[in-house]
Image (cartoon, rainbow, N blue to C red):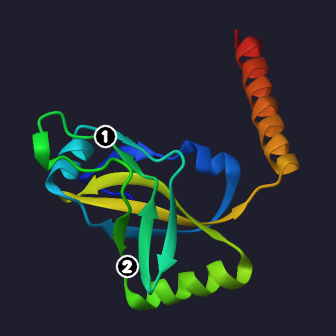
Amino acid sequence: MSGGGIKVVAENRQARHNYFVEERLEAGIILTGTEIKSIRAGRVNLRDSYAEITDGEVWAARMHISPYDKGNRFNHNPLRRRKLLLHKAQIRKLSGKVQQQGMTLVPLRLYIARGLAKVEIGLCRGKKTYDKRAAIAGRDAEREIARAFRAAAR
């Protein structure tokens, strides 16, 4: 999902802290005119957002897209549910994994590719508290090692 012409607008960094990401998918998103203008301006927050499968359709919930400054009466509700565009086979596969294995769909990042807004959703498994502590301890250890190398190089 990398390449030319991609502008990352928002990233859900908290998702990597709270979940193990098992699989990633690119999905289109249905937006109104003022929403895409706010996205292009970078006014998006994915922090508490999640995706759910309802009646064979995937919906993004609690994805905050701020109202467009010049949108007047045509502005949108910032927290409305937005439909994600995936193939039926992908939706069936995700639905099976979410129902049977107790996994969650989480929007990881929102970006603009070839002029279209796309959402990268992750099929995620929740981390336990001790997993989070271990990840933090590992990051701290790597930071200490890097600091020691820099000090030794001087």
CA separation in Å, label 1 and label 2: 25 Å
- In x, y percent, where is residue 114? 20, 59
Q: Residue at x 32, y 61 (%)?
A: 118
Q: Is residue 67 above or below residue 33?
A: above
Q: Closer to the observer: label 1 or label 2?
A: 1
In-image side of 9 versus 62 (left or right): left
Q: Residue at x 17, y 48 (%)?
A: 34
Q: Residue at x 74, y 19 (%)?
A: 147
Q: Neighbour class for label 2 at 10 Å: few (<14), some, many (≥20)?
A: some
Q: In the rendered image, which residue does mark 1 sit on?
A: 66
Report the number of numbered marks.
2
Query: Which image quadrant: the N terminus?
Result: bottom left
In-image side of 151 versus 45 (left or right): right
Q: Residue furthest right?
A: 130
Name the residue type under label 2: Leu
In-image side of 106 versus 67 (left or right): right
Q: Is residue 1 visible?
A: no
- In x, y percent, where is residue 91? 47, 84
In-image side of 119 versus 49 (left or right): left
Q: Which residue is nearer to you in this view: 76 or 89?
A: 76
Q: Neighbour class for label 1 at 10 Å: few (<14), some, many (≥20)?
A: many
Q: Residue furthest top?
A: 154
Name the residue type under label 1: Ser
Instruction: State which tag comes first along the sequence, 1 or 2.
Output: 1
Q: In the rendered image, which residue does mark 2 sit on?
A: 86
Label 1 secondary element: loop
- In x, y percent, where is residue 64? 39, 46
Query: Which image quadrant: the C terminus?
Result: top right
